Each structure stands twice: as structure tokens, then as C-alpha cells.
Amino acid sequence: MTATDVFDAYVHTDPGTLRGDSGKPYLVEGRCAHRRTQLSAGWVEGDCLRCRYHGWKYDETGQCIEQPGLEEEGGFWDKVKITSYPTHEYLGLIFTYMGEGDPPPFLRHRDMEEEGVLEVGIPEYWPCNYFNRLDNASDGAHMAWTHRESMSRVGRVLKTPNMREAVETNYGLRSKSAGYGQGAHYVHLHWPNTNQNLTAVRIEGSLEDAKHLITNRIFWRVPVNDGKCVSFVVDNLPLKGDAAKAYVERRKNAEQSDADLHQIGEAILTGKMRIQDIDKGMSLYKLFWIEDYVVQCGQGLIADRVTERPSPLDRGTLMIRKLYEREISRMAAGLPLKEWTEASNLVHDEPED
Ligand code: FES
Ligand SMILES: [Fe+2]
């Protein structure tokens, strides 16, 4: 079993099944040691997990502690242990470390810790390699076209910014788009797979929210396997007091499921419908989701980067690839990797490197 298999099994479970009755989250290998069925279908008992197939029970370290029917004779539970992984809860998500040795220091995103409405979005499971999503992480040039329908629904028309900058920073990469009288827009990459930006329009709730609110948003782009990825998204909306309460109420009424979004995205990619024909009542959060899905999954499971024709406006995208290439080559050569640092205040001021 690879770490990817484990992750694949676990990212599809209700996180409640990972949380012990004490409230602490645990993560163990996805399959039972007995006959390898998926453990997430079993039961949480205290801080233990019991397999649904024949009832073997594991504690939080992955140690088997019960084998029903073998209590008196033939039991060997003390010799059975499945892998367990450390967990860390932060911003409404549960993080883990599946590498060797101790986990590296956890880098915080202090901008997201500021007072406001913190929202964890629905995980975005997409049928494409995670690098399709990372390629988009510093791509301000797509806004005017990919999101033209969403923008039109709030009465905005964007032009492709003609000015693009991409700078390697201590935390990763900062890219800036500007031009044609439109304000500067920054997108940040926290190394290696995390995007942060201030964003408007893609907001759940009412159309008025989409018109007026701006949220500080962060995405973790995570590979599941070569042809599948998931993005975990967290928003921090700078709303306080009654304004925050009222927004949370409006947000509660918004539908949580993303199942029909996939269907719509696929219907568009297979020519059965057009984005401009999507129900005008759909929230702009969901419409944005579909717009991005169509162009990024439309690149194929793994985008063909050999035959593509990048332009100077793809500077940020090309720089992300270069950084990956550089760091992976160093790793392959056994050389030290860059020590990336935490970064905050990216949403307030002209950021510093
Ligand atoms: S497969 Fe889990 S107890 Fe048999
Ligand atoms: Fe987008």
C-alpha cells in the first residue's frame, strides 16, 4: 500500500469517522490488516476504530486490540498493527504528515487567523492532475475569460491584464496582474501547493454578497493520484458582529453538495450545454467552480505541456514549474532544499519578499 492509496481511501470519508469520541482526530491506514477492507466504513468506539467486515478493533496508534472470536484461542492481535499518522487541526481542517521521521514544523497562515467569518468550503475533487490546478495558481490572465459569465452577472467586464510580474519570495511566489486601469491583483503561492488571494465575486450566499464582499482565501492543492486531485479551500471573510451573523445565516441556506457541479462541468465539456445557459439563480461561488473546472479539467488529466505555446502572460505559471524543477532536481541530487518560511500580511499591504 502506498501513501496515495491511504489518502485516496481517507479523503472520501466523512471526517467524523476519523474523530474519536474524545474529539481528537486520528488517522490510521485506510485498510484493515485482516482482509484489507476499507476501515472508514467501520465504527468509532471511544478513540478506537472497528472494522465493519469481521470486527477487528484498532486503537489510535493502529495497534489491533481485539479479534472477535479469537479471544480464547488463536488470537494474535498483539502482533497486528496498521500504520498511524500524526494529525494537526488548523483552520477547520485536519492535516497529516505521511513522510518519514518527525513532521517538519507546521507553517501557519496568520492572515487566516484574523477575526472574521472562517468558512471551510466543500472539498473540490477533480478528475485532473493537481498540477493543472497549480498552473492556475498564479494565472490572473484567465479571470477575464474563464469567469466572464460570473463577472457579467455582477455587471463587471474585465480585460486581460497586460502587466504581469512573478517574483520568488521566501514563502514561495508572488504574482501580480495589473493594467488597463484595473487595480493590481496579487496571487500568492506558499510553497509547495498552497494558494492565497483576496477574491471577490466567487462568494456563496446572495448575489449582493458576490457583488460587495471580498474574502481572504486559501487553497491547498493536493494530489490524490496522477489523474485526480482535491482542493481544500478556506475563506476568512472580514465581517464582524451582526454583519458576520447575518452572512452566516445566508450562507447556511446555500446548498453544500458539489455532486451536480461535476455533472454540469462534464455536460459542458461534452457539448451538452453551455456555461452561459446555467441557471441564473446559481450562486457565483458555484458558477466560478464550474468555470474553473471546465478549463482546468478541459486540459486533460495531465495537461500536455510539451506542445503548449506559453505567452509572456504565463510568467507566473512558468515560474512555478521552474521552481518545482529546481527543487526536485536538488532533491534528486541529495542537495539541501530551500527553507521556505511563513508569510503573513499578504492581504493588507504591498507584500514584502
Ligand atoms: S477485514 Fe477487517 S476484520 Fe476482517
Ligand atoms: Fe479561476
Image: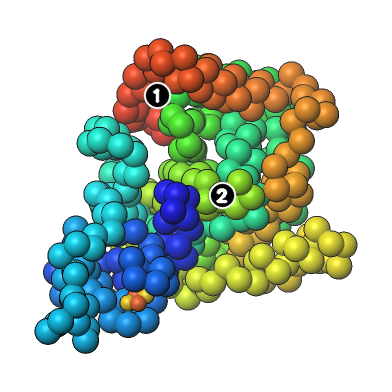
Report crowding for label 2: few under 14, some 14 to 19, many 20 or more residues within 10 A (C-alpha). Answer: some
Please give the residue where the numbered disc 2 appears in the rendered image.
225
Per the image, label 2 sits on a secondary structure element best described as strand
30 to 177, vertically: above or below: below
Q: In which quarter of the image is residue 279?
A: bottom right
220 to 332, vertically: above or below: below
Q: In this view, does 84 lie to the left or right of 75?
A: right
Farthest-out residue, front: 74
Residue 294 in view in this figure: yes
Per the image, label 1 sits on a secondary structure element best described as loop
Q: How many labels does the image show?
A: 2
Q: In which quarter of the image is residue 275?
A: bottom right
The residue at 32%/28% (across/down) is 342
Q: Where is residue 137? Give x, y as percent.
A: 58, 36
Q: Is residue 26 left or right of residue 98?
A: left
Report crowding for label 1: few under 14, some 14 to 19, many 20 or more residues within 10 A (C-alpha). Answer: many
Please give the residue where the numbered disc 1 appears in the rendered image.
171
Q: Where is residue 51? Give x, y as percent.
A: 32, 76
